[in-house]
Image (spheres, rainbow, N blue to C red):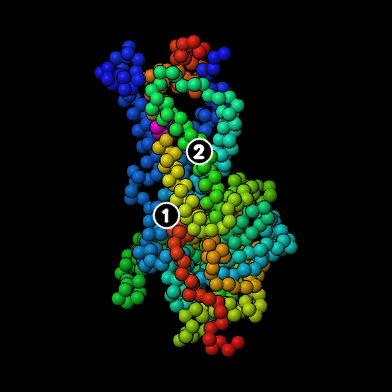
Amino acid sequence: MTAPARFNRPARLLHWVMAALILAMLLIGVAMVTSLADYHALVALHRPLGILILMLAVLRLANRWRRPPPPLPVDLPGWQRRAAHGSHVLLYGLMLAMPLVGWAMLSAARYPVVLVGPVVLPPILPQSPILYAALRQLHTVLAYGLFGVILAHLGAALMHGLIRRDGVFASMAPWRPHRAALPAGKT
Amino acid sequence: MTLLNDLAGAPPGMSPRALLLRLAAIGALVGTTAGTFAYAGGWLSPGSLTPARVVDRFEQVNGPHPGFRRNHAKGLCVAGAFTGNGAGVPLSRAGVFSAGRVTPVEGRVALAGGQPYAADAGTTVRSLALRFRLPDGEEWRTGVNNIPVFPVRTPEAFYEQLRAAQPDPATGKPDPERLKAFFAVHPESAKAAALIKARTVTSGFADSTYWSLNAFRFVAADGGTRAVRWAFVPDGIAAPETAQAVQDDMNYLFDDLAAQLRQGPQSWHLVVTLAQPEDPTADATRPWPAGRETVDVGTLTLTGATPEAAGNCRDINFDPLVLPDGIAPSDDPLLSARSAAYAQSFTRRAGEAKTPSAVTGAPHPGAGL
């Protein structure tokens, strides 16, 4: 039995929805901390989006566990294979860590974590200014880290799609790939 | 070019020209993404005013006072409760206004300015910061001051005013020429300063009226909104400031309040002023015309005072945009800027070592109690 050459439909849908959400989230985050006029509007968007991303990330991991992704091309050099594996561990780790660190730091600062209207999440840490200060710093460092990994992921995906043309990009592409874009024997 | 083909993992059939074009396209896409991030983060507009620069200016003007708020640095924690009388229910769906609903409140009285050890003075702006704790984790935080209007209209003017009003080290007073130049550019601030100067200064924190200054919107159960401002009006009769020529107690305003609270609770009515459509909501320097409809929506009663310490009002950011469902921001540009600058100040002081406040709230020697 041959492995499926494409990610399943839920995986592709989750990937592209989350790609848009996470990029928007990083832009909102980096913009809000330097903005006076739009600070409040952006923070009010940042909190519920973060929790949405956390929920989608859990869903996505569950789907990935149930339906493992297609294997990488056999001719992929070992270092690229390791880089692909490592960057995906980082991506999933940060997708989960960023919202949790955000929620935890707001809890330590005793800010109500307002999602929408009267819906407020409970605190997940005791009140502690020192803990808040450390987590707030961590949130920034992890955000830059996540953006860096996303840039590498984007570059690598485009290398696969435009230059190697080995079916890796096509396996996650939102559109149905041409037969030629998939590795022979796996269609 | 076969080396490049090998490195890039390109199929042998791809011409060097096609490979380079594709590599350039990839570089452009990744670069554009990084550039968008840099643009959003303000790296391409280094001259714009940011929360960090506002708080930097507080630190320049007041000197470093690690661990303390960058503004309203000298304060005392207070606690009590708010009891709604039901009159606010048609205006706002926030549960805090329900008739008979008692909401626990913790707060902080403070003096404006970034000097935590400055001596109390009658004309220094007094503030009351409050944190209403509603059911299910909702909160209403508000900071109100004993001035009828705010001295500036925009965050940029606030930033300029901090520098213009900085005391000259030689005289201890702001340079009149600098202030004059500031008021020339900001006539709205000159008018506000006159209103602030003309206010009645009362004998202490307990008999002061505190105004919201900024406008907000009350959202009713049916979704209808009204622009409002609010004030906490003392229950008792306000005594004029006594001509205390020499105050031997550096903290007399705070110590007086603590002593009054030891004798009994102190109450204020929360009075909401309803705007007419023509009233300015985005200009905190302008009062609304006298005679606007007001609604007394309940009573704030403070019952005790405690010095700032770990876990109490010291560690709370009284961000005026922490609002429950039923109260929303207006279009006043100061609101978002206050929220941003408070967050910046809070983040900085949260990570700094703490020094005890000058205000202990204890009876001072010779008080004869």
* Residue lying farthest to the front in this orientation: A78
Up the image or down, A12 lies above or below B356; here it is above
Q: Chain of mark 2?
A: A
The x and y percentages for residue A95 are 51, 38
Query: Residue sitting at 41 percent across and 67 percent down?
Result: B65
Q: CA distance from mark 1 to mark 2?
A: 30 Å
Q: Let me know if marks 1 and 2 both belong to one chain.
A: no
Question: Tag 2: Cα neighbours inside 10 Å, few (<14), some, or many (≥20)?
Answer: few
The quadrant of the image that shows the N terminus of chain A is: top right
The x and y percentages for residue A89 are 48, 34
Report the disc number at residue B51: 1
Query: Residue sitting at 58 percent across and 35 percent down?
Result: A58
Q: Is residue B173 visible?
A: yes
Query: Residue sitting at 49 percent across and 39 percent down?
Result: A94
Q: Secondary structure at mark 1?
A: helix
Q: Amino acid at mark 2?
A: Gly
Q: Is residue B48 magenta?
A: no
A66 or B252: nearer the viewer? A66
**Residue at label 2?**
A93
Tag nearer the camera, 1 or 2: 2
Q: Chain of mark 1?
A: B
Question: Tag 1: Cα neighbours inside 10 Å, few (<14), some, or many (≥20)?
Answer: many
Task: Give, as a single range, the part of the protein colored magenta.
Answer: A150-154
Dominant secondary structure, magenta: helix
Kindly indicate whether the residue at mark 2 contacts the one at mark 1 (C-beta within 8 angstroms).
Answer: no
Hey, which quadrant is residue B320 in on the image?
bottom right
Q: Secondary structure at mark 2?
A: helix
Q: Is residue B358 left or right of residue B141?
A: left
Up the image or down, B41 lies above or below B63; here it is above
Q: Is residue B328 visible?
A: no
Query: Residue sitting at 45 percent across and 86 percent down?
Result: B246
Q: Amino acid at mark 1?
A: Pro
